[in-house]
Image: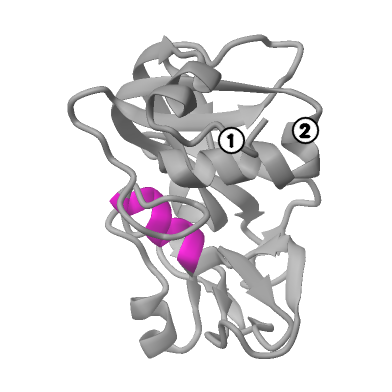
């Protein structure tokens, strides 16, 4: 999901159309919308060209990983219908991953979880893991626009927002990342799972 230095964002004029925003170019607009018709930010596709931007996430690859429940590291299927799909995050004051929690982070497969907790600086400070029975699309995060006061050009609000798909204002969002709701969460001992899968050596 990491962006590369040659994958610049594609900036195209945004206009007001109906009860929301649209790209002025109808072709771009058509290809930039998800199944709920939300408008998404666009980037060039040049994975592997230039240098990796470690703090950057490619919008399209993030969407694809979340839509298809692909591992956020290797992009292979991570869904596990028997035990539940594995989600992994850094330890926070919130504690374990909770049922109905919202996240922008795709799942992870067990082999990549082993590598991540061994090498990722963020996870080296602590992590929590959970098996999730159902992953439900919830909404998007990004920039919300409002109608222009002195012209027909919509104006972006300065602070990023998150918004559910059932919000009447969703048509005004310029999305950069998806939010999903985690249902049927079961906290797990990742160390124990790695040990059972013979993946513990070198991981922790």
- Quarter of the figure that contains the N terminus: bottom right
Sequence-wise, the earlier of marks 2 and 1 is: 2
For this rendering, which residue is in front, 6 or 174? 6
Q: Residue at x 43, y 85 (%)?
A: 28
Q: Which residue is mark 2?
A: 124
Magenta-highlighted residues: 61-68
Q: Secondary structure at mark 1?
A: loop
What is the basis of the colouring in this image?
one colour
Q: Residue at x 80, y 42 (%)?
A: 121
For this rendering, which residue is in front, 118 or 163? 118
Q: Residues within 10 Å of mark 2 (few under 14, many from 20)?
A: some
Q: Residue at x 47, y 68 (%)?
A: 60
Is residue 102 visible in the rendered image? The answer is yes
Residue 159 pos. (x, y %): 78, 45
- Quarter of the figure that contains the C terminus: top right
Disc on res. 201: 1
Q: CA distance from mark 2 to mark 1?
A: 16 Å
Q: Residue at x 61, y 30 (%)?
A: 89
Is residue 21 visible in the rendered image? The answer is no
């Amino acid at each position: 999901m990491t962006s590369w230095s040659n994958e610049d964002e594609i900036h195209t004029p945004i206009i007001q159309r109906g009860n929301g925003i649209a790209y002025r170019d109808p072709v771009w607009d058509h290809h930039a919308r998800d199944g709920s018709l939300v408008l998404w930010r666009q980037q060039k596709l040049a994975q592997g060209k230039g240098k990796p931007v470690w703090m950057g996430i490619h919008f399209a690859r993030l969407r694809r990983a979340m839509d298809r429940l692909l591992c956020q590291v290797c992009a292979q299927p991570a869904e596990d219908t028997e035990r539940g799909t594995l989600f992994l995050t850094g330890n926070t004051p919130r504690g374990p991953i909770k049922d109905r929690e919202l996240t922008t982070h795709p799942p992870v497969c067990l082999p990549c979880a082993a590598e991540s907790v061994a090498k990722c600086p963020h996870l080296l400070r602590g992590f929590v893991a959970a098996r999730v029975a159902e992953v439900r699309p919830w909404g998007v995060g990004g920039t919300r626009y409002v109608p222009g006061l002195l012209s027909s050009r919509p104006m972006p609000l300065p602070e990023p927002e998150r918004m559910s798909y059932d919000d009447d204002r969703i048509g005004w969002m310029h999305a950069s990342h998806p939010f999903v709701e985690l249902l049927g969460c079961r906290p797990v001992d990742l160390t124990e799972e790695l040990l059972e899968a013979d993946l513990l050596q070198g991981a922790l």
